[in-house]
Amino acid sequence: MHVHSAKASAEAESSRDMLFWQSNSLRAGGWPKVYKSPPKTQNTYVLAAPENDALPRSRHHPYEAQLDALESVLCSTTLTQALGTAPLRSVTDLGLLLERYRTTVLEPIELPAIARAHREAAQGRALELIELDKEFAGQHPEWLLLTPASTRVGRDYLTRLRPLQDERTVQRLIEAVRFGRTPGHHLTVFGLTMAIFSIALRQGLAEYAQYALEAVVATAAGKLKLTQLDRDTLLSRSQACLPKAIERKVA
């Protein structure tokens, strides 16, 4: 191994360890903290990468950045169309949409897809990961209207992992997406990112679910003129159901 490659590998390992320690320190209080709405903080850690293809230092860590990007995928207007619900005109309408999304998309579709992607990536099974991504949309017609945004976000954040040259699974998925062999859904890329940076399955699913519900509410907040109390009330109802659902996925 070249000196430069060895240095990059060592730095990448250090970056993973630092993120893992930070994430677990933030969650040290256990399950209840996962379902609060903490302020989004700027993460100064960056991926270690070759000097000629380094990730910009101004960006969040890929794991956090993908959570922040969920508003680009889970737009409330698109969800009403995808799920066949009435247009949003009140807080009550949004509450019904949120529950419909949680029970028909988030829990039965998104969380299992992330868990499977995490499992395949953690075991270095690139071909199985690619096949999982390729078959995803065809198995879930509810996802059809969400596919353009999902693949746009997925490809974007997958590209940002390119500097991890030693990660064979990352490079093979990038190649498959590049040549049109698989679409590159954001769920697949998120599960892969969890595996690369040693994010525990329970933690990753819990944080994804929390941010996903917040994204749906946030994209409707302006139109419905939601107060902070409205937002907190809506989210507390849906988030209260998440621990049991996530435990089932982990088990």
Image (cartoon, grey):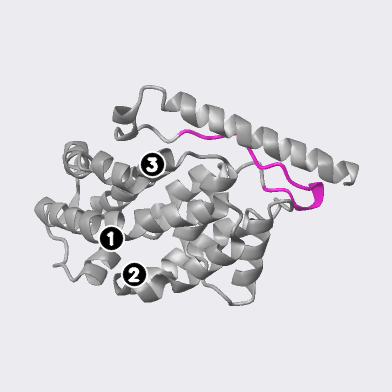
Amino acid beneath label 3: Glu
Residue 159 picture quarter? bottom right
Mark nearer the N terminus (2 vs 3): 2
Kindly give the residue lying farthest to the front in the view shown: 251
Vertical order, 9 against 173 (above or below): above
Q: Which residue is mark 1?
A: 105
Q: Which residues are magenta?
A: 41-55
Is label 1 in a helix, a strand or a loop?
helix
- Amino acid type assigned to the residue bearing label 1 in the image: Val
Seen from the viewer's position, the closer of residues 205 and 251 is 251
**Magenta segment: does it hold 46?**
yes
Q: Residue at x 44, y 47 (%)?
A: 68
Q: Residue furthest right?
A: 2
Nearer the N terminus, badge 1 or badge 3? 1
Element marked by disc 2:
helix
Considering the numbered disc 3 on the image, is that residue within a helix, a strand or a loop?
helix
Residue 69 pos. (x, y %): 44, 52
Mark 2: amino acid: Trp
The reply to whether the C-beta atoms of the residues labelled 1 and 2 are less than 8 Å apart is yes
Query: What is the magenta segment's predominant secondary structure?
Result: loop
Is residue 251 or residue 143 the one in the foreground? Answer: 251
Q: Is residue 43 inside the magenta stretch?
A: yes
Numbered badge on residue 143:
2
Instruction: Classify the position of the C terminus by image quarter.
Output: top left
Q: Quadrant of residue 84?
A: bottom left
- Cα–Cα span, label 1 and label 3: 16 Å
Quickly name the residue at label 3. Answer: 207
* Residue at 62 percent of width and 32 percent of height: 17
Q: Residues within 10 Å of mark 1 (few under 14, many from 20)?
A: some
